[in-house]
Image (cartoon, rainbow, N blue to C red):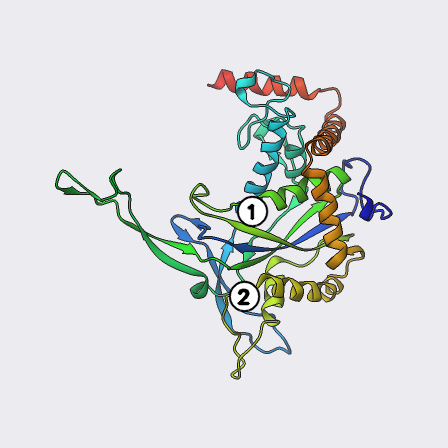
Amino acid sequence: LHTIEKQDVFHPSIPLIPRGKYVHFVVLRETSSFPLFQTDQELNFARVSAGRLENGKSEATISRVVIFKRKQTTPERLTGRELLRRYGLTTDEESGDAARYCEYNSEDFCKHCPDCIYYGFAIGQEGSERSKVLVDSAFSLSDYDESHQSMTFNAPYEHGTMSKNGTTKSSFGEQDHVLPQVFFPSIITLRDPTEAAFIYVLNNILRTKRYGAQTTRTGSVENHLVAIAFTDGEICSNLKLTQTLYDTLEKDEAGKVTKGPYQSSVLVKKMTSALPSLLKEDRVTTHLLVDGENLHALVEEVGELVTHEESLIRVLQKAYAESEDYAARCRPGKSAKDENKKAKSKSADVK
């Protein structure tokens, strides 16, 4: 990456223990359809302060829609895993290649591909790897009542009606959906990044388009990259970022925040302006803050790499090589191929 090549922000290889280098992707997630961020058939929400508490005064509380952490990381890591399989760096069960076989959310994690090493895995007694990608729940900028709508649904027959042979189906239902143009400020942190890991995780964020349940029918979300901060520690929470952004919204004569829909370009500018003060509050050393035109140049450069197949394959191969090297250093004397075969054999015996 020529746009940040002179900055000492990347490790040459993945370190075995934390070394105090962090890169934070500050993202504004905007719903573009009617996604479902739910557990047990209900939208996830939390009642919190609308903005930040100032001068000891009590701030009004509101309910906000919540995207839990795994509902953010799972679609993004599946995007990366899809690319790894496409270019033969990992395989599925049908291929017969035990050395590169990796299955998500099972006992058959390969333990040495970029997804396993960057995002982590846990296989009980077989071992685990702590995720280097840190994510937390994201909160909607607007309140719950303004952010959702209850909708009815049905399941008609092929001819388009609910009746057949004089009998009407009873498959009617009702479900809460998040509305379009609801915004969720979010920070994705990559700890101790290498250059390949940085590009891999950023590419997953930019490529992922659907989140939540029923993604084959809805769930479109656009990720607006606001800034990238390279620091020596973690920065503010998603809730604090959301409350800070809420305080910058326009207010009416009574002092109440005007309701949306809001424009993403306006919110991005407000978030960019608020970041330096937030970083200062976090008492971290900011080695590099990429925003504005510099961010555009960096995204364009990464885009050139990942939209051309040859350069994308090189990035993925580099990420795979450094992940394999890390796995070998973590478990000396045991090759990734031997461990994978052992795990598959044990799984087959259990079945």
Mark 1, secondary structure of its residue: helix
Outermost residue on the left side: it is 166
Residue 262's disc number: 2
Q: Residue at x 52, y 78 (%)?
A: 256
Q: How far from the left and from the top, in percent, is residue 282?
A: 73, 61
Closer to the camera in the image, 139 or 152: 152
Closer to the camera in the image, 120 or 34: 34
Mark 2, secondary structure of its residue: loop
Outermost residue on the right side: it is 6
Q: How far from the left and from the top, in percent, is residue 134?
A: 65, 47
Q: Residue at x 58, y 30 (%)?
A: 123
Q: Amino acid at mark 1?
A: Gln
Residue contact at pointers 1 and 2, CB within 8 angstroms: no
Up/down of 45 relative to 277, above or below:
above
Q: Residue at x 70, y 66 (%)?
A: 273
Crowding around mark 2 (Cα neighbors within 10 Å: few <14, some 14 to 19, many 20+) is some
Q: Which residue is mark 1?
A: 72
Q: How far from the left and from the top, in percent, is residue 212?
A: 48, 46
Q: Amino acid at mark 2?
A: Tyr
> Between disc 1 and disc 2, whose residue precedes?
1
